[in-house]
Amino acid sequence: MDSSENAKSGHRERLRKRFLNAEGGARTDEALLELLLTYGIPQHDVHPLAKSLLVKFGTLENVLAADPKALCEVDGIKTTTAVLLKLVDHLRQKPAAPKPTAKLQERPNQPDAPTLPGLKLEPLAAATKPKIAKPLKPRHGTELFGKAVLREAVQLAPSLPDTESPDEIREYLRKNLHFNAEETRKRYSAYIARRLFPDGTADKAFRAFAKANASTPELKEVCFYRFCRAEPLMQTVMADLFLPALGLGRVRRERIIDFLQSKFPQSKNVSDCTQVIVDALVAGGNRLNRAG
């Protein structure tokens, strides 16, 4: 390593220490953005790039909220760095899981509700209930999961039917997945629907994007991003393992296994979940060191 590389490495280490120690000026928009960019661009001085982004978008919050295409228009920002910025943006906005609400217990032989003079109330049974499509149920909580099927999701996303009905989306996936067993297609169609639409609705924006970007790296990255939103454990692995290792260029498979075993010491499915994480990364267009 030459003197310039040593100086660069020393500067980045000082950025990290100043941030951890909450030193003065270490948490300005410019300093925070520069530190973040060091994980996405390990081989260059990113301080000028941080300044350029802030000049274009105004604030760190605006940088993170910017459209990926707008980010990539800035000289020095590639798709990988744009994904890093958008992932951080999503993590900072991710709402806490809603607390379960207590259900009201029905009271047997409950007397009729009192009525006001001149006000006629229809029996509840006679009321007309609007038919509402059953939404895709978002998944909450952090847990091990099996089967990525992200490759299949990327392949079928451009041909999804023009409908916002989750049931029709699942039925289309069931009929078009390549698996032979009916039960397998049914199960995997539910996996894919939940991961492509983690907010619980078959949104038109994604379906239009998928049709317009079939067989492109951008579609893979968007599907991978939604996969991470649907699987909270994947978000944790990305934030705690892959983002800190961007400067190293790789994460060994054993490191993922150790991480999962520390979180789920009683589980016998850690190796399977590790393989699913690797499969999802590959399907999402992320380059991995196969030897690791």
Image (cartoon, rainbow, N blue to C red):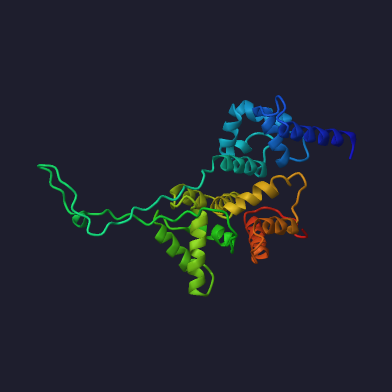
Residue 101 position, x and y percent, is: 41, 50
Residue 98 in sight: yes
Residue 279 at x, y = what percent? Answer: 65, 60
Q: Relative to residue 45, is residue 286 drawn left or right?
A: left
> Which residue is the extreme one toward the right?
2
Q: Is there any visible trace of residue 66 in the rendered image?
A: no
Residue 62, picture quadrant = top right
Image quarter (top left, top right, bottom left or bottom right) of the C terminus: bottom right
Q: Residue at x 56, y 62 (%)?
A: 152
Relative vertical location of residue 188 with respect to residue 157 in this rendering, above or below = below
Along the viewing direction, whichever of 79 and 183 lies nearer the viewer = 183
* 52 over 190 or under it: above or below: above
Q: Residue furthest bottom?
A: 181
- Which residue is at 66% across, 45% downward? 80
| Total numbered labels | 0
Residue 13 in the image, given as x and y percentages of width and height: 79, 35
| For residue 28, side relative to residue 119 (left or right) | right
> Where does the N terminus fall, quadrant-wise?
top right
Q: Which residue is the extreme one toward the left?
A: 118
Q: Nearer the viewer, residue 114 or 176?
A: 114
